[in-house]
Image: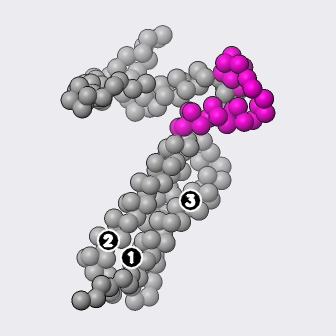
Amino acid sequence: MAIEFSLSAPVAYAIGSALAIPGYLSLIVRLPRLRGRNALQFAMAVTTMLIVWVALVASGSSIASLTRADLWTSLMIMTSGTLAYLEIWGLMSRGYTLGIMLTLYAASKPLDERALAQRYRGGQGLSWVMHHRLGGLIAAHAVRREGELIQLTFFPGLFIARVYQMLILVLGLRRTG
């Protein structure tokens, strides 16, 4: 009994399209209208990956030979590639620890905590982390501002907080943050 190791064209296209996500992303981040909109940039890179795969499969004889197994295998490959790059992208775009290390590198000398906090994020300081995370929660409608006060919304804020609290208890995790 021999094991078949050849790839169908759609599966090979899926591998190539997924491996090219960093290339798509490096082009998309240079679009002026998308500057600073990391989540949208990543979503567009993934959409580009899917469009490229569909275009490659639709060209030539690949569409006629596309089987259900090839379709699902291709989708799983592209989803896996997307998740792998999403982890790397998330670490790089929201990696506060890496940001501190980069700040120290840019300083080219040791810094005390005060100087490090002042230079962090290109001079925005460590308070930038709080403002950035709070801005994300406000954009997601999980919290809202009422004057100087910040309050959980009923949904999704309170719902997410309760589910998170329950998961911490059930899974025996330490509270994060």
- Residue at the front extreme? 1
Report the span colored magenta: 94-119
Helix, strand or loop status at disc 1: helix
Q: CA distance from mark 3 to mark 2?
A: 21 Å
- What secondary structure is the magenta-colored segment mainly? helix
The residue under label 3 is: 22
Give 78 or 40, whichever is nearer the viewer.
Answer: 78
Q: Is residue 51 above or below residue 84?
A: below
Color encoding of the figure? one colour
The mark nearer the N terminus, 1 or 2, is 1
Q: Is residue 167 above or below residue 84?
A: above
Identify the residue at horizontal 47%, vertical 65% (top origin): 18
Q: Is residue 108 magenta?
A: yes
Report the side of 129 relative to 168 (left or right): right
Amino acid bearing label 1 = Val
| Place of residue 153 in the rendered image (x, y in percent of width and height, measured from the top left) | 32, 22
Q: Are marks 1 and 2 in contact (CB under 8 Å)?
A: yes
| Place of residue 116 in the rendered image (x, y in percent of width and height, measured from the top left) | 69, 23
Q: Are marks 1 and 3 in contact (CB under 8 Å)?
A: no
Report the side of 157 relative to 98 (left or right): left
Is any part of residue 7 visible from this angle? Answer: yes
Give 96 or 105, whichever is nearer the viewer.
Answer: 105
Task: Rate crowding at label 1 as few (under 14), some (14 to 19) or many (20 or more) other CA atoms within 10 Å.
Answer: many
Give 148 or 70, whichever is nearer the viewer.
Answer: 70
The residue under label 1 is: 11
Image-quadrant location for residue 4: bottom left
Q: Is residue 35 above or below residue 109?
A: below
Image-quadrant location for residue 11: bottom left
Amino acid bearing label 2 = Thr
The mark nearer the N terminus, 1 or 3, is 1
Helix, strand or loop status at disc 3: helix
The residue under label 2 is: 73
